[in-house]
Image (tube, rainbow, N blue to C red):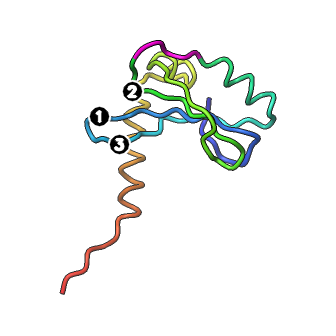
Amino acid sequence: MSKQNEKRAGYIQLQFFDSSSNQVVSLGGAGFATKEEDDAAWANIAVFDGESAFLADRLDSEGDIVDEKVISAETCEQLMGRPIADLINEGRAELKDFLKSIKRPSHTK
């Protein structure tokens, strides 16, 4: 899977709930050109039977979440082709940069 860049028929986004910061960290995802590709990719993601901090979100062409599955860290690694520690560290860094970019400057009197 790769990160979503342009409008597609659907998307799958992998998320990690970071209990240390109480934030949701994006681990990456993919966009699919056709509904058939999107349906097939979603069907091939195994649901994790148990508790997990990892989730696959299925998004429609507008980016709205239409379904979700609890998944394992191993599934994230398989889908992204990268170690989970790297995905989490990069996701945390991207989230930190994003939050910094939207933080409003404080005004002093």
Residue 103 point in image, percent of width and height: 35, 65
Q: Quadrant of residue 102?
A: bottom left
Q: Is residue 82 left or right of residue 62?
A: left
Look at the numbered disc 1 and give the secondary structure of its residue: loop
The reply to whether callout 2 and callout 1 are in contact (CB within 8 Å) is yes
Circle 2: residue type: Ala
For image coordinates 53% across by 36% down, the residue present is 28
Give the labeled residue for mark 2: 53
For image coordinates 78% across by 37% down, the residue present is 33
Q: Earlier in the sequence, mark 3 or mark 2?
A: 3
Residue that protrudes farthest toward the left in the picture: 109
Badge 2 crowding class, 10 Å Cα cut-off, few under 14, some 14 to 19, many 20 or more, is some
Circle 3: residue type: Gln
Q: Earlier in the sequence, mark 2 or mark 1?
A: 1
The reply to whether callout 1 and callout 3 are in contact (CB within 8 Å) is no
State which region is magenta: 46-50
Please state which of residues 41 and 97 is positioned toward the viewer in this rendering: 41
Q: Is residue 68 above or below residue 100?
A: above
Residue 98 point in image, percent of width and height: 42, 55
